Image (spheres, rainbow, N blue to C red):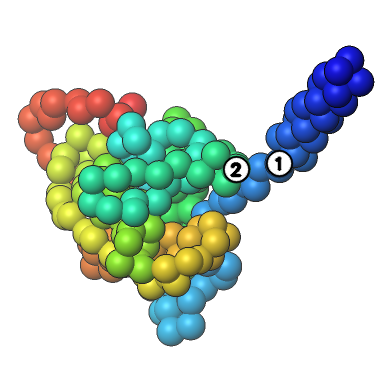
């Protein structure tokens, strides 16, 4: 009887040790959004004259996205967090940096800076973004929805206010690397919409008379 109990105890200890080893061996994968590299084919060269100076940010994200774990949405009411697939940096910072890089590629000759910029940066326009949704959904797409605004007068004068929703296809059983790639393409599509609007705006804004109310996040 004693030997049987000992054998059972030994088997239990072995099983627990094996489970502990599996838990320790589970590795975490880290991902980042990537920007386009260099000017896109078909992008026009910079026009002569003053260069536009564009500030990107602040970028805000909803609380459910403000965490390291990558997010998918199996159903409209359900959010799933990937414990072992995470962003390598805060998502709002990654988004701001990638959008700035994309707009630099789309607007040759423009000076682009991620908020907050150095005091000496000569701001023409400031682009702020409020991300509403960024995840893979059950229909086999990555969805990026965001409202964005363009300000002049050092961030104090609202010039443009838009809301964009873009999607990129991804396989239903795609891994998180493919999801991150599709989300990068979605960010690129959003950057292209913003760049198209900024490109059509003048490089120099006429000064406004009177006192303008300073909004949070405005350039000082």
Instruction: Give the residue at mark 2.
Output: 84
Q: Nearer the viewer, residue 15 or 19?
A: 15
Instruction: Give the residue at mark 1.
Output: 26
* Extreme residue toward the bottom, this view: 42
Asked whether, in this view, residue 167 is left or right of residue 162, the answer is: right
User: Which quarter of the rendering shows the N terminus?
Assistant: top right
Image position of 55 with respect to 156: above or below: below
Q: Residue 214: x percent and y percent?
A: 20, 26
Image position of 207 with respect to 103: above or below: above
Q: Is residue 102 visible?
A: no
Q: Is residue 31 visible?
A: yes
* Extreme residue toward the top, this view: 2
Q: Residue 196: x percent and y percent?
A: 28, 68
User: Which quarter of the rendering shows the C terminus?
Assistant: top left
Disc 1/disc 2 C-alpha distance (Å):
8 Å
- Badge 2 marks a residue whose secondary structure is strand
Image position of 203 with respect to 66: above or below: below
Image position of 169 with respect to 115: above or below: below
Asked whether, in this view, residue 137 is left or right of residue 90, the answer is: left
Q: Nearer the viewer, residue 181 or 201?
A: 181
Q: Residue at x 43, y 60 (%)?
A: 183
Q: Nearer the viewer, residue 72 or 185?
A: 72
Q: Residue at x 66, y 42 (%)?
A: 28
Q: How many numbered marks appear?
A: 2
């Amino acid at each position: 009887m004693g030997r049987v109990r000992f054998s059972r105890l030994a088997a239990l200890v072995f099983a627990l040790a094996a489970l502990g080893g599996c838990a320790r061996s589970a590795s975490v994968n880290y991902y980042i959004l990537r920007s386009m590299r260099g000017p896109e084919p078909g992008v026009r060269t910079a026009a002569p004259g003053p260069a536009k100076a564009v500030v990107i940010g602040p970028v805000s994200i909803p609380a459910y996205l403000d965490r390291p774990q990558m997010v998918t949405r199996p159903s409209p009411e359900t959010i799933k967090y990937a414990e072992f697939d995470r962003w390598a940096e805060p998502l709002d910072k990654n988004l701001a940096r990638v959008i700035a890089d994309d707009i630099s590629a789309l607007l040759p000759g423009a000076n682009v800076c991620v908020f907050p910029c150095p005091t000496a940066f000569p701001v023409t326009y400031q682009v702020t973004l409020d991300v509403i949704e960024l995840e893979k959904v059950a229909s086999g797409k990555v969805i990026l929805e965001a409202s964005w605004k363009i300000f002049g007068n050092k961030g104090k004068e609202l010039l443009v206010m838009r809301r964009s929703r873009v999607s990129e296809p991804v396989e239903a059983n795609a891994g998180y690397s493919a999801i991150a790639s599709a989300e990068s393409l979605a960010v690129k599509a959003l950057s292209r919409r913003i760049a198209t609007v900024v490109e059509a705006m003048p490089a120099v804004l006429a000064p406004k008379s009177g006192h303008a109310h300073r909004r949070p996040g405005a350039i000082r």
